Amino acid sequence: MTRILAIANQKGGVGKTTTCVNLAAALAAMKRRVLLVDLDPQGNATMGSGIDKYELEQSVYDVLVDSAPLASVVQRSPEGGYDLLPANGDLTAAEVELVGTEHKERRLAESLTGCEGRYEFVLIDCPPSLNMLTLNGLVAASGVLIPMQCEYYALEGLSALVDTIQAVARSVNPALQIEGLLRTMYDPRNSLTNEVSRQLQEHFGERVYRTVIPRNVRLAEAPSYGLPAIQYDGKSRGAQAYLALAGELTRREQEAAVAAESVVAAEPSMESQNHVS
Ligand code: ADP
Ligand code: MG
């Protein structure tokens, strides 16, 4: 089964792209088959994956607007070990061009059907707004991973995102859930960080990942070399944190599978109880 995760937060600079690139590389390092979808016209995930956004013959724009087949646009990240559906500034026009087309919020979802089996994880790097591109990401996904900095206004922005996720779940994509909240650029010496972190856990409980991503200069340097931090400096605290996150994510997945199995195993006895009554 393919798990499709949208990495979303309408706030810019919270670590969406850093998380997308490094989680993709960490899952790939664990021998998982991963596709990274760059859905941001800035093309930062594309550049950070070692693909030059100025040299693209085709991009995610062609997939969304002209229904170009995924396989003809996907490229391999040279060092990352995962596949990439790249983006560049062309994508800015997509929103306008999709106006009036049918199912414009389902374009990405439709183009991803058929890649089941080829990938175990699809990670979607959303742009920093709740626009049609992000909506395409949320409609295609089964889970949303929300990176956030533990600062004062972070919680305020979160409610608009949660409202949007709930609206998408009520209308077009009932399967959509908040997969988890990831604390990024984490600094435990900052008392505000600890306070916001506490409020997050109070509100979202288990959905807050135990793994936190520390502020680490290696994570900021790696993209300028077109490398995920794991390849740039695998021993760095940043790289290690994303490896830990990949571990937590796959562990949760296994726990969910075991729980689902035990529900299936428990069903016959429930059925026989029903017969008795
Ligand atoms: P977004 O995609 O949400 O806009 P980015 O992932 O591009 O955010 O991160 C914003 C900036 O912060 C980038 O320059 C990135 O290199 C840097 N950055 C992200 N996460 C970290 C971190 N944990 N430690 C240090 N710098 C980080
Ligand atoms: Mg970004």
Image (cartoon, helix red, strand yellow):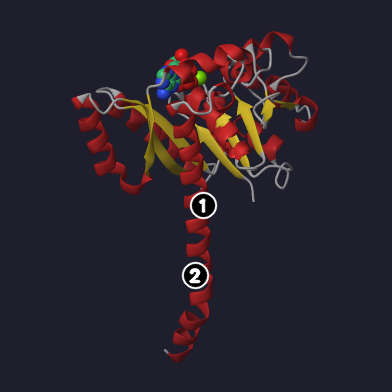
Callout 2 amino acid: Ser
Which residue lies under the disc numbered 2? 262
Residue drawn 80% across the image and 27% down it: 72
Q: Is residue 220 visible?
A: yes
Where the C terminus falls, by quadrant? bottom left
Choose the circle earlier in sequence order: 1 or 2: 1
| Towards the viewer: 111 or 217 | 217
Q: In the structure shown, which secondary structural element does the residue marked by tag 2 occupy?
A: helix
Quarter assignment of residue 5: top right
Q: Position of residue 126 (x, y in %)?
A: 53, 26
Work out how far the residue at label 1 is from the one at label 2, CA to CA, in angstroms: 14 Å
| Towards the viewer: 271 or 21 | 21
Q: Residue furthest front?
A: 235
Q: Position of residue 120 (x, y in %)?
A: 64, 45
Relative to residue 165, is residue 99 drawn left or right?
Answer: right
Q: In the structure shown, which secondary structural element does the residue marked by tag 1 occupy?
A: helix
